[in-house]
Amino acid sequence: MLDPTRDAELGRWARLLGTVAATAGADIPVGLAPWFLHSRGRRAAPPTAPSALDDVLWSAVAAGSPGRFSIPQIADPSRPAAMVPFDDAVAIEVWTERDLSAMHAMSRLVERTAAPGAVARLDAAVRWHLEFTQPDNATGRPWALHLFVRRWAEAGDAEARLYAETLLHNCQMLAGAPDPLSGEILRDSADALRALVSEEHG
């Protein structure tokens, strides 16, 4: 069933993200988010196989087909749960960015597959971050921003809208515009939001 209010909000955010992304520079330093950039056609495939969960998922996105990607399982999908197990040896900023990047990649895979439990698993991760982290726990890059926009548009969750707004604000703080990698992340989030609207009207 079509929801004009939802679609209008998703479309508004897609345009906003595209506008902000257009202010970013183009030269992304070598070594940053190689599998994500490969999925966007900005880099060749890295020479070594991915090991971190977000890189594994982005490599599946880059392959153009989800194949048999592994959904990180939890005992009770109705309860909030992060995607990446927390590691005390890793700085909270690094861990948060990895988790949000994994969520972002899985959302792009979910567009292409009906993998059982994938949508519920993503929702559990979004709810976990809303409950336990702040957007500035990460390094200023807006990974998974579209997932928080979607929760706002579909569930009316004002906290999710604030989380998305803060991710967008934080990536522009240092220079008044997103860094080049953040710009590419915003473009991908905008594409994801447009795909949601197209899917609804498909």
Image (cartoon, rainbow, N blue to C red):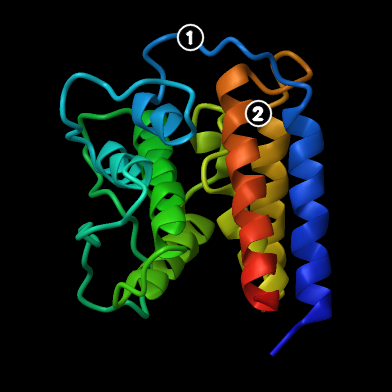
- Label 2: which secondary element: loop
Residue for point 47% across, 29% down = 41
Q: Nearer the viewer, mark 2 or mark 1?
A: 1
Q: Is residue 3 left or right of residue 72?
A: right
Q: Which residue is identified by label 1?
A: 29
Q: Nearer the viewer, residue 114 or 181?
A: 114
Q: Is residue 3 above or below residue 121?
A: below
Q: Residue at x 42, y 31 (%)?
A: 93
Mark 2, residue position:
171
Provide residue 10's location: percent of width, then percent of height.
74, 62
Residue 117 quadrant: bottom left
Image position of 66 with respect to 141: above or below: below
Count the marks: how many?
2
| Vertical position of residue 34 compared to residue 67: above or below | above
Callout 1: 10 Å neighbours few (<14), some, many (20+)? Answer: few
Within-10-Å neighbours for mark 2: few <14, some 14–19, many 20+: many
